[in-house]
Image: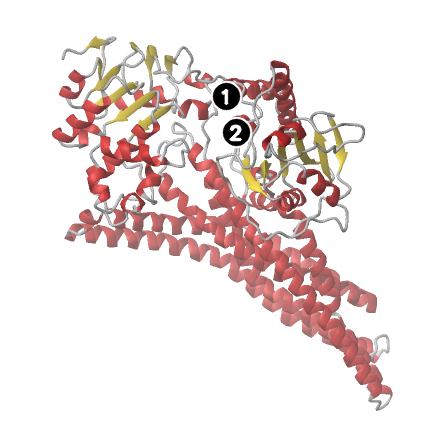
Amino acid sequence: MSNSAFPSGSEPDNDSGSFSRDSTPSGNSFSGGGLAFQRRLASEGALTLELLVRERVKMERTTVQRMFHQTLERHEGALPADWWQIFTESASALQLRPAVLDCSVDQVLRLINDGADVVLFDIGDEARARSLDKASSVRPTSDRDGEEGSIAQWILLSHDAKGRALFWESSRNEYKTINSARRLRSRLSQMTEDERIRCVAFDWREVSIQATNSSGPPMKPIARVVQLLRPEWSDIWLVIVFAFVVGLFSLATPIAVESLVNTVAFGNYLQPVLVLSLILLLFLSLSAAIMTLETYVVEIIQQRLFARIAGDLAHRLPRVATEENEGKYLPELTNRFFDVVSVQKISASLLLDGVTLIMSMSIGMVVLGFYHPFLLGFDALLLSAIVFLIVVLGRGAVKTAVKESKSKYYMAAWLEDVARCQSTFHTASGKRLAASRSDRLVHDYLINRKKHFRVLLRQVIFALSLQAIASTVLLGLGGYLVVIRELTLGQLVAAELIVAVIVGAFAKMGKHFESFYDLLASVDKLGALFDLPLASQGGTLHCGSDEPMKIELDRVTYSRKGKKPAFAPLTATLPPASSTAIIGPAGSGKSTLLDLIYGSRRPTAGIVEINGSQPSELQSDDFWNHVEIVRDGEVFASTIDENIHVQRTYVSGLEVENALKAVGLDKTINSLPEGVQTHLTSSGAPLASNQVRLLLLARAIAERPNLLLIDGVLDSLSDDEAESILEYLLRDDHGWTLVIATGRRWIAERCDHSIQLPLSTVAQTLATN
C-alpha cells in the first residue's frame, strides 16, 4: 500500500502477467542512422541518466555524462539497439541498482504508481513501420500535434519531491506532470507491437539502507530501525491513522455502558437498550473492519521489509571489499540475515498491537480528563509513571539485548564449525571439546540473558503494580466524586472501564517492551551486514579491446596492517598472451600478488598496471568481465550448468560442453542421471573434491577471459590431471594472458616466465623448458 503517483481514479489496471528479467531484447530492435543521429541519441542518453540521478544522488554532472559516453564507446556506438545495456552498465558504474524488465504497459504504470523511476526508449514511428511486414500498408501515426510522427528518443518516467509522476521526452527536454494514467497508457502502447516493453527500472527504496561510515562510530540500533522503516513511512502513517480510529471506537463500549447505566437508573425501558446495542454493534463492526485493513497493510510492510533487505544484501555481498573484511568469516556472518524474520514479526506485532494500545491509552486519558479535573491530575500521574517505566527502569535494556543476541550467534557459529569439521570431532577428545566449548557458550548466553531479564522483570513488576494501584485509586477517587455529586454513576463506571483498558494496555506493554528490545538487537545484527565495507567501483576507464592483457609491476609490495611486507619490492613485465608462474611455498605471498593483479587489493607501495592503466582507474565491472580468477571452494548450490555459465548470456550450452571436455569432466557429467542439470550442494557433492576443482577451471575456460589467474588449483590435482589441464591452458589459440600461482616447480618450468617468492631481490626470469 503506497501513495499513488497518479491523480485519484487514474490508477493502472491490474495485470495478471508477471515481470520478466531477460538479457535479450524484447520486441523490435532498430539500429542504424547517421553520425548526427548517433550523436543526438548519445547526448540525450547522457542527459537522461543525469536527470535520473540529479534528485537522488549527489554526483558531479560531468562524471555522469563521462560514464555514459565511455560505456557507449565500449559498445562501439550501438544505439539504439543496445540502449538498455548501455544505460544499465552506466548506471551500475555509478553504483545505482538498475533492473532490466520486459513488462506490459499496465505493469509499467504499476511501477510508476509504486514509486519507481523508469527509463524507456522509443525507436520512433519510422523504425516501427520498417519493422512490420513490408507487404502491409503502414502509415506512421503522430503522437504530437503538428508532427508527422514520433522520432527515436529517450523517455524518463520519474517523480517530483511531492511524489507526483512526471513524463520527460528527450526530444522536447521538458517535464510534464502525468495527469491521466489513460493518456500515458495510450502513449506507451504506441511504442510496442507485441504488448511488451523493455524498460530499465530504479526502485530507490532499495538503496535506502546506507552503511555506517567506517571512520565514524557504529550507528545506534534505534537509528537503524528508523532508517530501515523510512521507505515504509507512508504505510506506517496509514497504520497509525487506523489505530487512532480503532482507539476512538474502543470508547464505544464504556460510553455505551455509561448511557445504559444512566438509562436504567431513570426507569426500565427496553427500546433505548436495543438502540444502544445496535449502535454499539455498528461501531464494533467498523472497528473490526478497520483492524482487518490494518492487518493487510502490515502484511504488505512485512513483505517489503524482507524483499528490501534481501535485495540489499544480494547487491552488497558480491561487492564486499577483500582488504577491509579480512578476519571476517562471511558465511557465518551472513547468518545474521535470519534476523530479518524477527524484524518482520516484531514490526508487525508492534504496529498492530503496540500502536493500537498507545492510541487507546492516549484517547482514554483525554476522555478521563474531560470528566473531572481530579481525573486530569490522575492522567498526569499515569503519564509520569509511563515515563519512569520507559526511561528509568528500561535503562540498559538495549545493551543487554544486543549482548544476548550476540551470544546466540557465537553458539551458532561454534555448532557450524562442529558440523563442518566432522572428522576432527569424531574423536573422543573432539567430542569433549565440542561439549566443553558448547557449555561455556551456553553459560555466557545465560549470563547475558539473566542481565537482560532483570531489566524486563523490573519493568513488568512496575507495570503490573501500577495496574493494581491505578484501578484501586480510581475506584476510591471516583466513588468520592460520586458521593459529593461531581460525577455521575454512569461516568464512574465508564471511567473504570477506560482505566481498565489503559492499565490493561499498560500491563501488556511489558510483552511489547521485550519485543521492542529484540527488534533493536535484530536490526543491530543486520547492521553487521549493512556495514560491511564495499569494494571501490574503480575509475571510469574501460579495458578497451578484447585482447590478451599486458601486466606491468613496478616495485610492487604489500603489507597487512601491523605486519611485514609479504614480499620484497617486485618489478616485472608479463607480455600479452604469455604464461607466467608465481612459485613459492605456502605463505610466500602468491595469493596476495594475484589479488593485486586482480584489483581486489591495492599495493602499499609501487604500481600495478593492466594494459597501461592501474586497476583502480578501471571501471570494476568492466575490468572483471575480462579477468577470471580460479580459487578452490568457490562452487555454489545450483546446477552444474549454472555453476559454469554463472548467468553469462554469451556462454552457450555448446561452450559449457566444450569447457567440460577441455578439463576432462564431460564423460563424468554425462554419466550422471541429469547431466549438466545435476544439482550440486555448496560443497560440490555429488562431485569429488578434485572434480569440483576441474569444474572451477571449466568455468574460467568458458568465460574466455583476456587474463586468467589460477591460484593453487593445479597443485591439488594429480600429476596426470595437472599435466593435461596445463597443456590445454598453454595453447596459443586462447587469447589470454595466463598467470599461475603454484608450488610445483615443473609447472613453473612449462610457463614462459616465472616469479620466485619470497623475494629478496627483484626477480623476473625466463623459464627453461
Specify the quadrant of the image occupied by residue 593. top left
Q: Residue furthest front?
A: 135
Q: Which residue is mark 2?
A: 85
Left or right of 91 on screen, residue 152: right
Q: Residue furthest bottom?
A: 268
Specify the quadrant of the image occupied by residue 479. bottom right
Residue shown at 47% from the left, 18% from the top: 542
Residue type (three-letter) at the residue carrying disc 2: Gln
Image coordinates for residue 173, horizontal then vertical, percent: 73, 25
Q: Disc 1 to disc 2, how far (Cα)?
A: 9 Å
Tell me the element at label 1: loop
Q: Earlier in the sequence, mark 1 or mark 2?
A: 1
Left or right of 147 on screen, residue 60: left
Residues marked 1 and 2 touching at CB (< 8 Å): yes
Tell me the element at label 2: helix
Q: Are there few (<14), some (14-19), or many (20+) residues within 10 Å of tag 2?
A: many
Q: Which residue is mark 1?
A: 75
Specify the quadrant of the image occupied by residue 358. bottom right
